[in-house]
Image: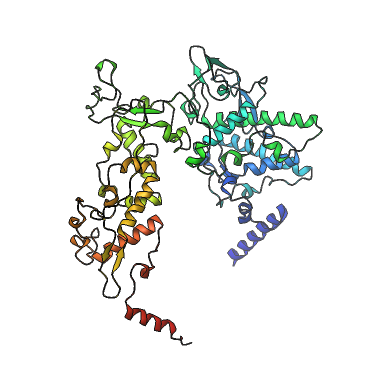
Amino acid sequence: MRDTVRKSLLMLAGLSLVLISGGMQPLFPGDVIGELPTDPARIPVIAPPPGLSASMDRPPVPFNHDRHTEALKRTKSQDCAACHLLQQADRRLAMPEVRIFKFPKAALDESDQTAVMYGYHEQCVGCHRKMSQKGKKSGPDIGLCGKCHVREPKVSTASWAWSPIFNYSRHAKHLQAVEKLDPRANWNVAKDVRVVGETTGKRCELCHHTFDTQLNRLVYKKDSENSCVACHKKKDEKNARSMKQVAHAACIGCHMKAADGVRDQLAKQGRTELTEQDKKKFGPLECRGCHGEHKDLKPDDIAKIPRLVRGQKDVIDLSLPVPEDSGAAPGQLVSTGVTAPSRMKAVPFNHKAHESRAQFCNTCHHHSLEKCGNCHTPAGDPKKGAGVSYERAFHRAEARQACTGCHATAKQDSKCAGCHQRPSKQMASSSCAGCHRGPSGGKALEPPILASFQDKDKVPATVRIKALQKDYKAVDLPHMKIVNKLVSMSNGSSLARWFHSGKEQAFCEGCHHKTELLQSASRVPKCSTCHNRAFDPNDLGRPGLTGAYHRQCTGCHETMKQKPAALECVKCHPLKEALQAAAGLILQTPHRK
C-alpha cells in the first residue's frame, strides 16, 4: 500500500512540474521531430559537441540549421555572424587571418565536457531567452531538455557528400558568375594568391591555388588546378585546413560577399527586401542550397557545357611506367625492377569521349587530378594510392573509379542486362584485347556500326519450340528479329560497339551460353542437349527444359523491360482449339453467388 501511495505521489509531483513548466507536453515529445522537414534537402544536422558524443548524458541534438537561419532572417535580419565567429587568426597557416564559422563563439576547452555543455547552452538557450523576452516565438529554455535532446529522433544524420554535388554544370555556372564579378574588388577565397605566368583570364585563381613552401605563400599557375581534397583533408594540417572548414569558409564566404554587394545596390535604389531574382545574383547561404537533392547529369547535358580543359590530352596511352633509360618504344611495357614485366599492350584511352560519361573530374580522379601512375605505382604505394597497384586501379570490378568497375555498372542498364545478367564467371573472359590495342599515336579510334544479320543459314528467321505442345501450340520464336534488335541496341552504345566490334557471336552467347558457335546454325546444339532432365535440386544451375526456356526468355524480358510480360503466357504459347473452347465456356458461365 505504501509503495502504491509513494508511486502516486511521485506521478503527481511529476505532473505538476510538467504543468508548471509549460503544459501537458512530454519531455520527449514525438511531435517535435515530426514538425521538422523530412525532405532530404532539409534533414537536420545531428550535432554532438566535438569529441564528447560518446560520453554525453543526453543524446545529441537534431539541429535544423536552415530553420534557424530563416528564423533569424525574419526576426533579426542577421546573417551567419549571429551565431558564428567568422574571422580568426591561425598561426599554422600562411595567412594571418582566415574566415571560419566557429560555434560557439566563446573560447572553450573542448576536452572539458562541462565547459562545452555550458558553452552550447549559453549561446543556444541564451538566444532563445532574449527572443522570448521580446515577445517573439523561440526555442525551449533550460529544464526542457527533451525538447532539444530527443531520445529517438525520426530523422537520420545528414551525411553531406561533396563529390556528387559539384559537377560540370555547377562548375560552369561558377565560371559564368566569376566573369561578372567586379574586377576591382578582391574576391580571392584566400585573399592573397600570386598568379604565376600567363593565365586564361578566367580568374581560376579565385578558387584554385597551391602552397609554395619556398615562397611561403599561395600561388596559382595555369593548368595546375587540382581537386580541393588533394590538399584539404578530413582534418586540419599545416598550411591546409580541413575540407569541411575550407569549403564553408570559401563557398559561403564568397556568397556572403556577393550578397552584400547586391544589398548595397538595393539600398541605393531604396529597397531592403530581396526578391527571388535578387537571390539568384549570389550563391546560397543555407545548407539545402549546396547540400540539397541533385540529379545526375546525362551525357547529352554535359555535351552542352563547354569542355573543361586543364591541359589534358584527348587520347592517352595507358601503360605501366617505362624507365627513361630502358630504350623501350612508347607503349612497350618492360620490367620496372619492382614487378614482373607485363606483356599486355597499351590501352588507347579516349579521355575526351569519357569526360561526358562522368559527372565531374573526381568521378575517376578521386583524390587528385594527377596522372594515375603518380599514386598507383606498379607495386602499389600504401601512402599515396592506398596500396592499390597500377594494374588493379583499372581492373577492380567493385571500384567505381576503375574502368572495369564503371563498365560493370554500365552493363546493369536494362538495354544490356539481358545478356550481362549472368554471373561474370559464366561470361567470356577474352575481352582483354578490346582495350589493350597498343599505342594510339594520339588518334581516337571509333568502333564501327554493326551490320544487321541477313544470312538465314547462320541465323534462322524463326525457330519453332515444341516443348509444351501437350496443352499449347508450338512457339514460333522470331529469332532473327530478336538478334537484330540486340544489334540495334548495341549500335546505340559506344561502349557496346567497342566490345562487340568484330564479335558476331557476342549476340548469340547471351542465349547460347557455354557453346562454341559454328558457321552453320544446323550444328548449334539444341537446348535439350544440356537441359534434358527435370528439375534437380542438387544441380540448380542446370534446370529442366521448360525451366530453362522460361528462365531465359521471361527473365530477359523482365530485365530488359520488353513485352510480352512474364505472366502473359498466351502471347507466346497460343492455346489449342480445345483449350480455347473450354476457356470460352468458363468465361461465359455465370458465377453463383
Q: Is residue 304 above or below residue 222?
A: below
* Residue 386 visible from this viewpoint: no
Q: Is residue 412 above or below residue 579?
A: above
Give the x, y percent position of residue 432. Answer: 27, 38
Q: Nearer the viewer, residue 277 or 16?
A: 277
User: To which quarter of the image does residue 501 belong?
Assistant: top left
Q: Residue furthest top?
A: 214
Q: Residue furthest bottom?
A: 592
Q: Nearer the viewer, residue 79 or 102?
A: 79
Q: Quadrant of the N terminus?
A: bottom right
Give the x, y percent position of residue 38. Answer: 58, 51
Give the x, y percent position of residue 477. Answer: 31, 62
User: To which quarter of the image does residue 199 belong?
Assistant: top right
* Residue 17 visible from this viewpoint: yes
* Residue at the image position 55 percent from the left and 23 percent from the top: 204
Viewed as shown, does residue 374 lie left or right of 41? Answer: left
Viewed as shown, does residue 63 lie left or right of 497? Answer: right
Q: Nearer the viewer, residue 156 or 269?
A: 269
* Residue at the image position 19 percent from the left and 57 percent from the top: 522
Q: Is residue 324 above or below residue 410?
A: above
Give the x, y percent position of residue 296. Answer: 50, 43
Viewed as shown, does residue 170 lie left or right of 461? Answer: right
* Residue at the image position 21 percent from the left and 52 percent from the top: 515
Q: How is the image coloured?
A: rainbow
Q: How many marks?
A: 0
Q: Residue furthest right?
A: 270
